[in-house]
């Protein structure tokens, strides 16, 4: 019991050691076979009997219409920490027990990959993965994911009231002008200097979920600014103009509006604000859609379902040159990964958009498993013409880099 409590306290401390400019956690290969740990809420499992060694390779939120099994993740409040983002790394918590309490059912890889809810649980279902059964890992690694350079919490908006309309081949977006990037591979980062480890590795773009680079990024890479959420709109126009003046040719819209712990914006509100804040830059830069999760479902709207509703709300007035999306699951799910990429490509085409950017993706599992996944995934992305850009999560110490060098084998597989 003492060791269990100690592990939980260490876990909570590791979480609090990172700046909370962006409030969720993803599962990913870390060097320990671990994944990000949930800090609260009830997570729903789908019916695919999917499990894996780390048990948190899942996807985004869905409220299923069929009976599901659940696991409940218990959290321990943590004290504040003064550790800076510059020194953030992975905290490995090994032991005979985990912070995950399996209240009922069987844990599966369809479980959420570790993002905490902001007060209250929600249900989850993976949209398409399956694998063989395995036990819950006792090794948990904690690191926050996408940081946005905004203050305050993400602006909540009302839930979408409209039922998702069926997709059609009619274009519901209007492309702006601009050229494609010279290469596909990008970097997501919180500390700009870490991107320099990839010098000479063909990195064509980089972003930090904010509207300014916050330092010098790797030579030859285009900095891509993002309008993370509604709390960032006041400074967006001047920041985006400055980024374009400095060479930015692409702009990213809202980050995971289909997730309550992220920008949390319903499709109608997102469409209205995309038109207001993103459209003015059409012709100056290529514009991305809001970046959706790989969740599925209409209650709440998630993933491609949210995307279709967004385009419907746009009424053909949103300037969108490429669809941005995210994917997280277990490293064994390469077939699911490929299928989801194709599903997004199809959804984009049905809405009049012929390019997609995978701005976040990550896999849980051992280093070797993740490296193998990355090798096949990047080869697939490079050979898929509709994919214009991608960035693995993330260029952070302990994932793609170790100190100032590319990590092995994960970073090496990505380089």
Image (spheres, rainbow, N blue to C red):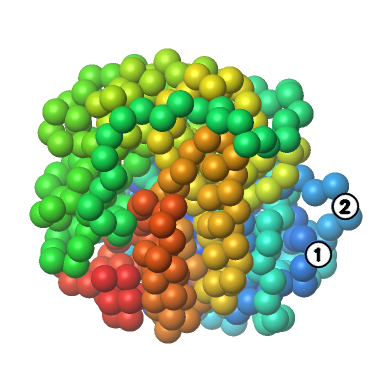
In the image, is residue 173 above or below residue 386? Answer: above
Q: Give the secondary structure at mark 2.
A: loop
Instruction: Report the disc number at residue 47.
Output: 1
Q: Give the secondary structure at mark 1.
A: loop
Q: Position of residue 165 (x, y in %)?
A: 72, 31
Q: Quadrant of residue 304?
A: top right
Residue at left 33%, top 24%? 282
Q: Residue furthest front?
A: 169
Residue at left 42%, top 15%? 276
Other residues around mark 1 within 10 Å, as few (<14) / some (14–19) / many (≥20): some
> Is 85 in front, or is 174?
174
Residue at left 49%, top 68%? 363
Whole-number angstrom distance, CA of label 1 to CA of label 2 = 9 Å
In the image, is residue 257 above or below residue 315? Answer: below
> Is 98 in front, or is 284?
284
Q: Which mark sits nearer the N-terminus, 1 or 2?
A: 1
Compared across the picture, whether 351 is left or right of 42 comes to left
Q: Position of residue 323 (x, y in %)?
A: 47, 41
Look at the image and tell me whether residue 255 can be seen.
Answer: no
Q: Position of residue 340 (x, y in %)?
A: 58, 58
Compared across the picture, whether 215 is left or right of 408 comes to left
> Is 176 in front, or is 306?
176
Instruction: Report the disc number at residue 66.
Output: 2
Residue at left 49%, top 51%? 326
Q: Quadrant of the C terminus?
A: bottom left
Q: Quadrant of residue 324?
A: top left
Labels 1 and 2 touching (C-beta < 8 A): yes
Q: Quadrant of the N terminus?
A: bottom right
């Amino acid at each position: 019991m003492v060791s269990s409590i100690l592990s939980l306290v260490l876990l909570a401390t590791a979480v609090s050691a990172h700046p909370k400019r962006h409030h969720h956690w993803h599962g990913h290969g870390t060097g320990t076979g671990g994944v990000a740990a949930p800090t609260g809420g009830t997570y729903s499992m789908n019916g695919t009997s999917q499990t894996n060694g780390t048990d948190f390779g899942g996807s985004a939120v869905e409220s299923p219409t069929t009976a599901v099994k659940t696991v409940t993740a218990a959290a321990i409040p943590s004290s504040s920490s003064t550790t800076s983002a510059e020194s953030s790394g992975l905290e490995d918590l090994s032991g005979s027990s985990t912070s995950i309490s399996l209240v009922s059912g069987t844990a599966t890889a369809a479980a959420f990959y570790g993002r905490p809810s902001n007060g209250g649980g929600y249900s989850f279902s993976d949209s398409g993965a399956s694998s063989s059964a395995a036990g819950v890992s006792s090794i948990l690694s904690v690191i926050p994911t996408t940081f946005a350079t905004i203050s305050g919490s993400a602006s909540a908006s009302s839930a979408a009231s409209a039922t998702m309309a069926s997709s059609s081949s009619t274009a519901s977006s209007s492309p702006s002008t601009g050229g494609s990037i010279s290469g596909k591979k990008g970097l997501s980062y919180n500390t700009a200097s870490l991107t320099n480890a990839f010098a000479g590795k063909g990195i064509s773009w980089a972003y930090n979920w904010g509207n300014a680079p916050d330092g010098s990024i790797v030579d030859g890479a285009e900095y891509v600014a993002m309008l993370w959420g509604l709390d960032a709109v006041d400074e967006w126009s001047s920041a985006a103009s400055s980024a374009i003046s400095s060479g930015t040719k692409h702009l990213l819209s809202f980050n995971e509006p289909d997730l309550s712990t992220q920008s949390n914006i319903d499709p109608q509100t997102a469409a209205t604000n995309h038109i207001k804040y993103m459209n003015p830059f059409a012709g100056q830069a290529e514009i991305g859609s809001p970046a959706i999760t790989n969740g599925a479902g209409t209650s709440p709207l998630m993933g491609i379902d949210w995307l279709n509703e967004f385009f419907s709300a746009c009424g053909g007035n949103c300037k969108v040159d490429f669809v941005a999306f995210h994917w997280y699951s277990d490293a064994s799910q390469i077939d699911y990964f490929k299928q989801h990429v194709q599903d997004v490509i199809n959804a984009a085409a049905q809405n009049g958009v012929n390019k997609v950017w995978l701005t976040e993706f990550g896999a849980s599992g051992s280093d070797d498993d993740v490296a193998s996944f990355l090798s096949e995934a990047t080869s697939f992305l490079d050979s898929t013409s509709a994919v214009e850009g991608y960035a693995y999560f993330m260029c952070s110490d302990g994932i793609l880099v170790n100190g100032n060098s590319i990590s092995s084998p994960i970073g090496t597989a990505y380089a």
